[in-house]
Image (tube, rainbow, N blue to C red):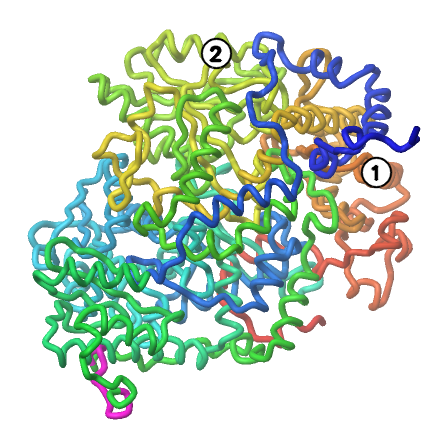
Amino acid sequence: MSDLPSLAQLQQHDRFLARHLGPDAAEQQAMLEVLGVASRDELIDQTVPPAIRLRQPLALPAALDEQQALARLKQHAQRNEQWTSLIGMGYHGTVTPTVILRNVLENPGWYTAYTPYQPEISQGRLESLLNYQQLTIDLAGLDLASASLLDEATAAAEAMALARRVAKSSSNTFFADENCHPQTLSVLRTRAEAFGFELIVSSLENLAAQPVFGALLQYPDTHGEVRDLRPLIEQLHAQNALACVAADLLSLLLLTPPGELGADVVLGSSQRFGVPMGFGGPHAAFFATRDAYKRAMPGRIIGVSKDARGNTALRMALQTREQHIRREKANSNICTSQVLLANIASLYAVYHGPQGLKRIAQRVHRLTCLLAAALEAKGMVRLNRHFFDTLTLEVGGAQTAIIEAAKAARINLRILGRGKLGVSLDEACSLDTVAQLLAIFVGADHGIDLAELDAAGVASGIPAQLTRTSAYLTHPVFNTHHSETEMLRYMKQLENKDLALNQAMIPLGSCTMKLNATSEMIPITWPEFASLHPFVPAEQAQGYKAMIDELEDWLCVITGFDAICMQPNSGAQGEYAGLLAIRKYHQSRGDAQRDICLIPASAHGTNPATAQMTSMQVVIVDCDKDGNVDLGDLKLKAAAAGDRLSCLMITYPSTHGVYEEGVREICEVVHAHGGQVYMDGANLNAQVGLARPADIGADVSHMNLHKTFCIPHGGGGPGMGPIGVKAHLAPFVAGHPVVELQGPNPGNDAVSAAPWGSASILPISWMYIAMMGPQLQDATEVAILNANYLAQRLGEAYPVLYSGRNGRVAHECILDLRPLKAATGISEEDVAKRLIDYGFHAPTMSFPVPGTLMIEPTESESKAELDRFIEAMLCIRAEIERVQSGDWPEENNPLKHAPHTLADVTGVWERPYPISQAVTPSAHSRAHKYWPAVNRVDNVFGDRNLFCACVPVEDYRED
């Protein structure tokens, strides 16, 4: 008889689980022993309140291994039909340079990094984002640009809000050209109604009919027309209103920039700069405005500052943490946006350079001109006189035949009602595409030789007075890296400046920087998912539908909700969508007066910022000495609100890193007063499989798919924030004006541009759940184990500020550094920067409590990595002791000078501690040294001397 194990014994049904979890069984047991418990079950019983426990396994399909999951998802993908989509409407075919595809989009050194709150370890992507801002500034023709927003439609809504903040007009009315993209108009309607603005959508002839505080114009418009906006902008300025222009970025290489026409805000999508359509996203929006409005800008701005040695250093400027500081007075609830996609667009511009980009734009326009001339020669009526890449055609009774011919050629046109069709050409088109289109519109026997027509010359579609004459992208970065060798090295140089998950644990509290497995990432670049236009006919996207339907079903099982809305494309958008659903629900019941939102003092800053965007009055509920919601204060404030109480926004486990025992009673208090409970999903990673938001009492909650469900943070985006709702709220979630969605009331407007938000990254979360199945609970339990292990090992050196039942924390813990600062002058920032010398990203600083560090290790970190972090923190504690004892001066020690760079060690060393202590303080740092590119960045200098464009190359040379 064979001694070999049986095939059944050899089958690894939990193969991926072992890859996803950091500590193996032996390591877990060793950590449990440190905690004084015999098993994970015992730890969970000590930690999670029994009143909220889910007592049965998650009803999910059994886990698949990586190959099985990829094969299953491939079956879905192959149900998507890859047609040539010439629909336009802000989404266009593009060619992603393979050097960028392989080395950025598919590179964990880029996609696993976090938002660059720690600039010393983020100089690479900060430089790329600064290039993106320069690209935007140059093409838009304005003074200042942000580092991306979520999509074109939400950028337009942010422009409307900015106009209201800064315009000197007393009007409460905003005007939008009816020829803006329909999804943009829908998001504008949503945002205007929530803010209490009056929105007029009409033809431009009616712009002067009444006073407005601003207007949105599209350039070229959704039907392709290119018009001179100067007279309209002058009308707006005459009444102290702002002119906001949604522009096509590629067209601005040939068209006069809107800023030169007088526009105050210019926005749009950078999707066609190398980012696939992806069934709607993710794509980075661009946003530019005047310098005078810089403090009213939404989103993140990258600025130029200097480091401790006086060398040029980049950082996020101005509104870096505005939601935490200004809360309900913040400009926007936008926390992070679309950094990875902005970097792809930025690098696309770097790779092609100004001449290469102009050539692409000229080629697209030339193809469109040839099509226009050929159609005109055959008597086809074009409705837009001028154009860049889009033609709107009057086809009359031939419409049905043309549509059928297009179907036969597997080409999608834009159908514009009776007798009208639209066609938008793009970078992926060729002369063969034009020949196909000509045959579709006028028949194969048209007799036109396109090559001869091209040689003979055709008229430009751009009016002479709108032909661009100003220079752009003159900075050396856009004129240097045009060979693949140079581009490859430039991107590698940027990557090497940054610290991402492929190098070390990123222990950021409230951020859940867990593994983004390679198998989860592979499908996002499959052309079956990447190439689809978001508005293709439903029969062409059956694979997407099957995948999204399954994902929604699984999320319902995990959260206990009855329905999911996939449209919100960030966590902050999820908050907004959830509060809008609550608002609409109250209105449907005749309770429109319910406008008070209760928010605990510990809440994430986006919560009050979101509440004010829905015109709710924020009332803060106190927390007790243990960090829990003060139940007595909640009862008083709920009673005081009375029939004005709309909702409570609560995070669970709390932002303080504990499971609040009274969470069910908290929900009951709110419900008893007619309110709804919104549960912020930031900490869902501590609930999956152990508890469910809907069972606890939440009516709606958003899920950060970029935290709990493994979509990577991308250096600051993309993300996805779908909301789960109970049945009574399901009719009130976001709809869409172009694609009919099942579930929402038919008249519901959108919160994001695309029907399913950033649909092309949903396969990541699908893969994660498919490969984990009911074992998702194991991930939650190990996340709790890792956090408690850290808290136990570090608690004597750094007090753990809050704990729950039996002294346990949830999936994260807060270390209190305030006593140390009072005794030694060493701050949480000094500890954070010193960790860089040990090769770590810092934990979350001063949130939710100033003077603290919040640590979340996640389930994906091994015991060895946790121990390395513990060793670093304990060594730093010993260094603080040397400052406290007087061995090192308070202002001249490794903590105050951290992080240390090559510039420090290659210069004259006159510090009271050795170089080895500075740069290689641990065995790991001696073997695997990460060198930050700059010393500690001067934040104050950067804000006082705001500069947000590319700097001369020589400024990067160190003194």
Which image quadrant: the N terminus? top right
* Image side of residue 365 versus residue 56, left or right: left
Residue sitting at the far front: 1
Q: Is residue 227 above or below residue 244?
A: below
Is 458 part of what is drawn in magenta? yes
Residue at mark 1: 864
Residue under label 2, please give it. 666
Name the one closer to the observer, 117 or 40: 40
Q: Give the range drawn in magenta.
A: 454-463
Write the residue at 32% across / 31% down.
733
Q: Which amino acid does label 2 sit on?
A: Ile
Q: Which of the 4 quarters of the picture holds residue 808?
A: top right
- Rate crowding at label 2 as few (under 14), some (14 to 19) or many (20 or more) other CA atoms within 10 Å: many
- Image vertical order of residue 279 relative to residue 328, above or below: below
Which residue is at the front of the view, 444 or 248?
444
Q: Is mark 2 on a helix, strand or loop?
A: helix
Name the residue: 51% across, 27% down.
Answer: 603
The kind of residue tagged 1 is Ala
Magenta stretch, overall SS: loop
Q: Distance between the Cα atoms at labels 1 and 2?
A: 39 Å
Marks 1/2 in contact by CB < 8 Å: the verdict is no
